[in-house]
Amino acid sequence: MRVAITGALSYTGRYLTKELLSSSSSSPLATSILNFSRRTTPISSTLSGDELEKISSTPLPWGDSKAMGKSLEGVDVLYCTYWIRFERGGDTHAAASDRVASLFRSAAEAGVKKVVFSSHTRASVDSPYSYIAGKARAVESLREISAGTGMNYAVVRPCGIFGDSASESILMNNATYVLRRSPLFLLPGDGSGRFQPVHVRDMASLMTSVGAASPGTSGEELDACGPDCPTAYELFSHLNDSCGGISLVLPSRLPTTVVSQMTRPIDWFTGDVLLDGDDLDLLDSGITVADNPDDPRIKDRRSLFEWVE
């Protein structure tokens, strides 16, 4: 089976690649992987030398549907984890949605059997968050293209991903940076919003199970969440205790815009966006949990609290 991944050597992509090419398996699900990315080396040593030899890399020719279709010829399953975190430099989440929709159309025209797309829990096109609304628009496009062409599809819906190390969770890593340095860690609102992230290896396993393991099925849309669903206050208090933080974690009942502005000096110092306003808003939005948080399929996945420890 030939597989294409948008970013096979990136964060989620390299774990998905490992799952598909696993050298511990007597019959790996994928025989070769096409990496749609300019990145030609993995960001960590997750993959073995033998596995890297089975990956060929090429930039995805956005804006050139003919070239995109040619790149996809012979591919059985396309995994799309592509997205943009922030709207910057004139690029928007709506434009990202249009780009992945063009990728889905090219995949159908090239004869790809199935597309698996990474969306977000409880995404809707009328969401006030452009990140979420864009993801929902992309899913709508995928459904329409599938209905019109017969190409199979699946959607997996995480709300956040954590990995084997602290650096593999943007939110947790950034929060730890603040917790270790600031005497006060203010949460917007009352801190009661819940968050149900998934471990990256469980995310990769789920994507594999709905993609290469069952390319003949279509229409699966599954939440990619872990078993722990803490409130923001519970999460950051636990993280503070576990990382040796010095902060008093306190629900401020202030709006997100005020709390995120308080971290701007740290952003300037680090050259990164530590706690984005939309990220904080999402934690209080009610959409960062599974449709059924107690789904028995979720219970066997890796625990966020055990990872924090």
Image: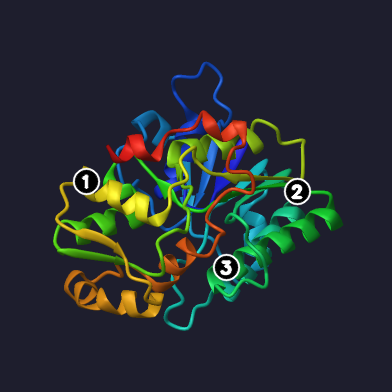
The amino acid type of the residue labelled 2 equals: Gly
First along the sequence among labels 1 and 2: 2
Q: Position of residue 4 (x, y in %)?
A: 57, 46
User: Mark 1 near mark 2, Cβ–Cβ under 8 Å?
Assistant: no
Residue occupied by mark 3: 62
User: Mark 2 near mark 3, Cβ–Cβ under 8 Å?
Assistant: no
Q: How is the image coloured?
A: rainbow
Q: Find numbered disc 3 in the image and state the secondary structure of the residue it sits on.
A: loop
Q: Find numbered disc 2 in the image and state the secondary structure of the residue it sits on.
A: loop
What whole-number distance in Å separates the C-alpha atoms at marks 1 and 2?
A: 52 Å
Crowd tier of the residue under label 2, counting other residues whose Cα lies within 10 Å: few below 14, some 14–19, many 20 or above: some
Q: Nearer the viewer, mark 1 or mark 3?
A: 1
Q: Quadrant of residue 279?
A: bottom left
First along the sequence among labels 2 and 3: 3
Q: Position of residue 244 (x, y in %)?
A: 15, 47
First along the sequence among labels 1 and 3: 3
User: Mark 1 near mark 3, Cβ–Cβ under 8 Å?
Assistant: no
Q: Position of residue 247 (x, y in %)?
A: 18, 59
Q: Quarter holding the C terminus?
A: top left
* As drawn, 304 above or below 185: above
Q: Residue at x 77, y 35 (%)?
A: 216
Q: Is residue 259 visible?
A: yes
Judged left or right of residue 54, residue 254 is left
What whole-number distance in Å separates the C-alpha atoms at marks 2 and 3?
A: 19 Å
Q: Residue 241 bears which disc, if any?
A: 1
Q: Residue 111 bears which disc, if any?
A: 2
Judged left or right of residue 181, residue 33 is right
Q: Nearer the viewer, mark 1 or mark 2?
A: 1
Q: Position of residue 47 (x, y in %)?
A: 37, 35
* As drawn, 205 above or below 233: above
Q: Is residue 1 visible?
A: no
